[in-house]
């Protein structure tokens, strides 16, 4: 019969022998613990990963399009977001026709007006409208507005008015 170690002396003889041979109760207990840890990690990871794939109210937001604005200005508005702790608004657009887009970007006198659909307020104060750029079709550019009096708020809808045309139901991020 094999010698018992000091650690094994506190266990009954059959448990000490099973432990040394690797066929005893120690292995099923370890498997059970590992299974419990895996289940716990999955229970925590699934909701976290699900939350990362959903961006709150913005997950299903679709930007409206206006063929008339695209034809007239050579751009497609792609995003409106309140930034800078609520004091600024960025209006992003994609260039479709570089020549028309350059005329649009250079026309500071007729910049788009941003109108809230939730309240009777608007803003037209363009803080940054870079001029003289070589515009490229497919490239995204942006305008920065002052959010005068908190005219636009995230999770609301607004309209963009420009050159007598209007793009309605634009989501504000």
Image: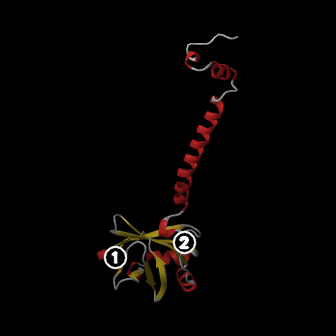
108 on left or right of 167: left
Pick the quarter of the image with the C terminus. bottom left
In the rendered image of this protein, does residue 163 appear above or below residue 98?
below
The residue closer to the viewer here, 161 or 32, is 32
The alpha-carbon separation of the residues under discs 2 and 1 comes to: 29 Å
Pick the quarter of the image with the N terminus. top right
For the point 59% across and 47% down, the residue is: 39
Q: Residues within 10 Å of mark 2 (few under 14, many from 20)?
A: few
Residue 65 point in image, percent of width and height: 55, 80
For the point 64% across and 36% down, the residue is: 31
Q: Is residue 132 visible?
A: no
Residue 18 point in image, percent of width and height: 67, 23
Q: Is residue 60 visible?
A: yes
Q: Residue furthest left?
A: 149
Residue behind mark 2: 60
Residue behind mark 1: 125
For the point 59% across and 17% down, the residue is: 8
In the rendered image of this protein, does residue 112 appear above or below residue 27?
below
Q: Residues within 10 Å of mark 1 (few under 14, many from 20)?
A: some
Q: Along the polypeptide, which appears first: circle 2 or circle 1?
A: 2
């Amino acid at each position: 019969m094999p010698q018992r170690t000091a650690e094994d002396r506190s266990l009954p003889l059959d448990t000490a022998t099973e432990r040394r041979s690797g066929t005893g109760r120690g292995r099923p207990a370890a498997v059970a613990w590992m299974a419990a840890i895996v289940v716990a990690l999955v229970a925590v990871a699934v909701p976290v990963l699900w939350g990362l794939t959903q961006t709150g109210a913005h997950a299903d937001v679709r930007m409206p399009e206006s063929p008339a604005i695209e034809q007239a200005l050579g751009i497609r508005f792609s995003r409106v977001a309140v930034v800078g702790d609520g004091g600024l608004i960025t209006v992003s657009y994609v260039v479709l026709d570089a020549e028309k887009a350059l005329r649009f970007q250079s026309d500071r006198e007729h910049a788009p007006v941003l109108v809230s659909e939730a309240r009777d307020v608007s803003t037209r104060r363009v803080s940054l409208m870079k001029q003289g750029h070589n515009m490229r079709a497919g490239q995204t550019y942006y305008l920065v507005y002052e959010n005068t009096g908190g005219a636009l708020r995230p999770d609301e809808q607004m309209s963009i008015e420009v050159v007598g045309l209007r793009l309605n139901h634009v989501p504000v991020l």
